[in-house]
Amino acid sequence: MNSIGSYLRDQRVKHSLSLNDVCEQTGITTTRLNRIELGQVNEPSPEVLKKLAEFYKVDLIYLYKLAGYLESNNFSRQIQPFNNYEILSDEERNFIQQAIDFLAGKHFATNKEAYHEV
C-alpha cells in the first residue's frame, strides 16, 4: 500500500503544483507538507488531511486509511461496496455504477414478478 506521504506528493505533482502553491491554497506550511511527503510525519493530523483531500479532490476516507486512522473493517459494505473503491476517480466510480444499473435493469426486467412490478 502507498504511504501517505508518497500519495500526497503524487497528487501534488499530478496537479502540477509546488509546495508553495499548496501552502497558499490550504494554509498548510511548506515545511509541514514537505515533511509529510518525505515520510518524516507518519500520521498527519486529520485536519491537515481534510484540507488536502478537499484541495486535491480525493477521498478523505482513503487518506485516513493511508495515515493509519482507519481500517477497512471500520465501514459497512454500503460505504465501500467493493475492494479498492476509495482509490477510484469519480469518473471510474460512475462508470462502474452505470454498469451496475444496466445489469440491475436487465435483472429487474426478467424477474418482474419477483419484485411485484407488473
Image (cartoon, rainbow, N blue to C red):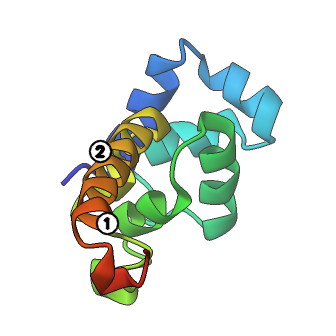
Mark yes or no: residue 116 visible. Answer: yes
Which residue type carries mark 2?
A: Ala
Residue 14 % position (x, y): 45, 19
Residue 59 % position (x, y): 51, 53
3D distance between C-alphas at marks 1 and 2 = 14 Å
Circle count: 2
- Residue at (31%, 66%) from the top-left corner? 108
Helix, strand or loop status at disc 2: helix
Of the pair 61 and 29, the residue shown nearer to us: 61
Q: Which residue is mark 1?
A: 108
Where is the N terminus found, in terms of image quarters?
A: bottom left
Where is the C terminus found, in terms of image quarters?
A: bottom left
- Residue at (81%, 41%) from the top-left corner? 27
Which residue type carries mark 1?
A: Phe
- Residue at (36%, 37%) from the top-left corner? 95
Residue 65 found in image quarter: bottom left
Helix, strand or loop status at disc 1: helix
Label 1: few (<14), some (14–19) or many (≥20) C-alpha neighbours in 10 Å? some
Mark yes or no: residue 38 visible. Answer: no
Q: Residue furthest front?
A: 118
Label 2: few (<14), some (14–19) or many (≥20) C-alpha neighbours in 10 Å? few
Above or below 24: residue 38:
below
Residue 3 % position (x, y): 29, 51
In the image, taking residue 57 as reference, residue 99 lies left or right, namely left
Q: Of the residues tagged 1 and 2, which is closer to the observer?
A: 1
- Residue at (41%, 84%) from the top-left corner? 116
Above or below 70: residue 46:
above
Residue 10 % position (x, y): 39, 29
Pointers 1 and 2 in contact (C-beta within 8 Å): no
In the image, taking residue 77 as reference, residue 36 lies left or right, namely right
Of the pair 38 and 67, the residue shown nearer to us: 67
Q: Which residue is mark 2?
A: 99
